[in-house]
Amino acid sequence: MKHKDDEKNEQNWLSRLFLRSWRPYAWIIAVGFFIYLPALFFDFNYLDDNVLIIDHYDHISNPDNLPKFFQEDVFHTPLRGSYYRPLLTTSFMIDALLGGTVPFVYHLDNLILHLLAGVLLFLFLARLGYRRNLALLCSLVFIAHPLLAQAVAWVPGRNDSLLTIFVLLSFLAFLRYLTYRKWLFLLAHLLLLALALFTKENAIVTPLLILLYLQFIYRKSTSLMAKIYFVILWGAVILPWLFIRAAVLGALVGTADFQIFRSLWQNCPALLSYFGKIFIPFRLSVLPVMRDLPLWPGLLSLSLLVIALSWSKHRRNKYILFGAAWFLFYLSPSLIQSSSQTANFSEHRIYLAFIGILMVCLELDWFRDFAVVKWKPICAGLTLVLLAGLNIQHNRVFQDKTAFWRNAAQTSPSSAFNLNNLGAMYYLAGNLAGAEAAWRQALALNHQEKLVHNNLGLIYLRQGNLVQAEKEFQNELALDPYSEVAIANLRLLANLKK
């Protein structure tokens, strides 16, 4: 049944241009393709993609290894690991079969997944009862926002777009079940929830959000017995996944259980940083650490949003609560990291959580007469143009490994890890002076950063300074006695001395 506002809007120019039949989907696809067209020709960035794809190409390109993907961590670590994401590896297998190690195929897949997520977001918001024009506006913001670029332009970032696709499909299937009460929709919901779990562990909070939906938004009352029935079904999906994941990783969360709450507490300021970047998407960083996260944009944005919502007389507090819970629930698991010193807060992790803030913003009174007051669609259009321009500019960061790591080092200068990798990119490009400068800076930040001494030894080795090279390799072994690269380089050095 159509909303009265939608029936009225069909008579105006906005509806004729954007909303009829297939047009919303065409606009979403067209805008996304226009923004990310250059990304199709980007290279790999050498953050995880070299390990996940290039180094293990023979493994992932063999379809016979598909069952093994569910028996190992995502990095194919022989001694367990930290991340269990078999469907991400499966997606790489499909790309490897289609295009080998050609980056174009992997970037094209990323773009298709992003466009599909945008289309599903439109369907999801419309299904929740939002007007189609507002659902389309939010979907276009989602497609164009530069904060989400890392999930599209960085190949491993597809993990979050895949997760979003399965979560939205699972939620839509559950909503269809509530409408038609057919068990096939409930079965589809559970299957899609399982796929989301095998994509990324953040999906585990989905049942909690569905319970919130039933409690606060669903117009019909749901009995306690029905909720218990749903919880039992969700448990039948989640518990086997938990046991399989624990068997592969050796722990339920990939880190010691007692560290969960401590990690959440230490890293919770990152929530404010993520929030600020939604409304002030400048100085974006591909691999920021806590010390370099700007918190003032988050404080400013949150304050202004709270004031705007308090002035909105027609806001629906239950929808605001649901949107805020969506943001917090889906983003919080990303704060659970094994070490606060090495924790990073890459921007692709906000991809699914971003939707929650869109739902909160839709409760502002500003959107109530959106289609009637003509300057508001014009204002929204200009905002989309600005976001698209910022996105296109930020996308260049992902064009190759040097640009990627230069952004990492410039926007998060407190990270010795970022400087170490920037130096490695300079070294591979033949810029020895730039490499040495970056590695010296890395040691100044953290004199125990692994591989830096080994890398400096490589420079001295190429310069013929064998004494200094040997000293650096020995320094690396002092930090990491089992460093295979340092041991191999010392053997090479011994052969050169003979």
Image (tube, rainbow, N blue to C red):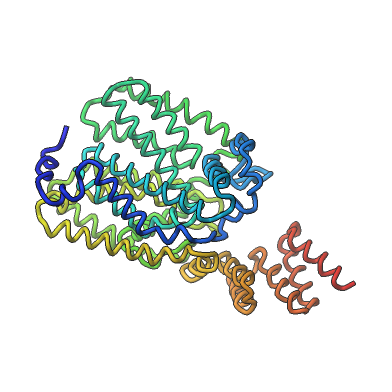
Q: Taking 12 as reference, is 296 above or below it?
A: below
Vertical comparison of 99 with 246: above or below: below
Residue 455, percent from left and from top: 68, 69
Give the image location of residue 260, x and y in percent: 51, 45
* Residue at (42, 57) in percent of width and height: 270
Q: Is any atom of residue 27 visible in this view?
A: yes
Where is residue 43 shown, x and y percent of the image?
Answer: 53, 61
Q: Is residue 400 shown left or right of residue 165? A: right
Q: Position of residue 261 (x, y in %)?
A: 48, 46
| Horizontal side, residue 235 vs residue 402: left or right | left
Which residue is situated farthest in the right direction here?
498
Quick one: 310 or 107, which is closer to the camera? 107
Q: Quadrant of the N terminus?
A: top left
Quadrant in the picture for residue 483: bottom right
Quadrant location of the C terminus? bottom right
Determine the residue positioned at 17% across, 56% down.
Answer: 377
In this rendering, the answer to whether 164 lies above or below 407 is above
Most foreground residue, 381 or 415: 381
Query: Is residue 250 shown to the viewer in this render?
Result: no
* Residue occupying the point 77% across, 65% down: 489
Identify which residue, 312 or 348, lies in the foreground. Answer: 348
**Residue at point 60%, 36% (across, down):** 66
13 relative position to 281: left or right: left
Number of marks drawn: 0
Relative to 391, does residue 413 appear above or below in the rendering?
Answer: below
